[in-house]
Amino acid sequence: MAFNIATFKTRALSAVFFVAIMLAGLLWNQWSFLALFLVIHTGCWWEFYKLMDKIDPKFQQVPAYLRYLVMALGVAFMFWMSSPLFYSLWANWNLHDLGWYLILVIGALTLLAGLISFKKLSLDSVLSLVAGFLYISLAWALMIKLRGRVTAGFQADLGWVLPVILIASIWINDTMAYLTGSLFGRTPLSSVSPKKTWEGTIGGVVLAVLVVSYGGHGLFDLPFRPLIFISFLASVIGTLGDLLESKIKRMAGVKDSGQMMPGHGGFLDRFDSLLLATPYVWIFADLFL
């Protein structure tokens, strides 16, 4: 395939813009962090619905109001998982408390909408909605939970540390896996994603662990052990997340989940690894940090 300078420029410029938006949202403050993942949450759900419509014609019968209510329930869940210390609102109220009341209200409305739409819903459609909630809303709610942690294992109350380490691990793993796979890749990893190789995957994981562990220790004086475990989990589970989304796209018969970024695909294409890796890193952090 001939090198296309125009395509390269488009991909490069959109990538720079994407990284700038991500870093601003992650590092500015807790509210920018929340806003960033609320946008990502909405984009992921929108693309998920489009993919399900293509995979299962019966899913097209799910009413728009029920789809929006499930998305809104996910937002309420994200609010509820926020730290009461970081997201105060007014008087004695905080986002965590507001999220709990919204879960009760929106949850009741969602059940009512499901009963009203009962004849239009197949069992597979209901299971798809539940799977989408676990796949998308749970992941981003746990990301907000990570942002509010007092990270004793790192001996620092820095809410951005865990999310940034997690995201950096996935970005570095993806980049290193591509480079090592291009140079040394011979053995296909999976028929779902023919371009991935075992050599690239192993190289990506090893290099991501090394870069994140030594970089985090050298730049921020963070301890090696949690850096090693988090970067390893993020890299391995993130690769599985990439394969999962590739399988979903293959079932839907599409190349990209959407068109969020020119040359880079949609929200699910950009965050598929993070969607699956976040719950596992949260479990590790909750048990050991």
Image (cartoon, rainbow, N blue to C red):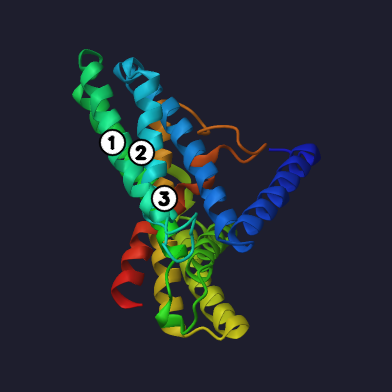
Residue at the image position 29 percent from the left and 29 percent from the top:
109
User: Where is mark 2, residue-wise?
Assistant: 73
Which one is nearer the viewer's eye here, 58 or 121? 121
Which one is nearer the viewer's eye here, 286 or 174? 286
Residue 190 place in picture, x, y as percent: 38, 47
Residue 50 place in picture, x, y as percent: 44, 25
Residue 156 place in picture, x, y as percent: 49, 81
Residue at the image position 36 percent from the left and 38 percent from the top:
73
Q: CA distance from mark 2 to mark 3?
A: 10 Å
Res. 14 visible in picture: yes
For label 3, the crowd category at 10 Å Cα-Cα, with few meaning under 14, some 14 to 19 and many 20 or more, is many
Residue 57's disc number: none
Identity, as a three-letter code, of the amino acid under mark 2: Leu
Instruction: Label 2: state its secondary structure.
Output: helix
User: Where is mark 3, residue-wise?
Assistant: 79
Quarter placement of the N terminus: top right
Q: CA distance from mark 3 to mark 1?
A: 14 Å
Relative height, residue 101 to residue 252 (above, below): below
**CB atoms of marks 2 and 1 within 8 Å:** yes
Q: CA distance from mark 2 to mark 1?
A: 6 Å
Identity, as a three-letter code, of the amino acid under mark 1: Gly
Q: Is residue 260 left or right of residue 4?
A: left
Within the image, what quadrant is residue 245 found in?
A: top left
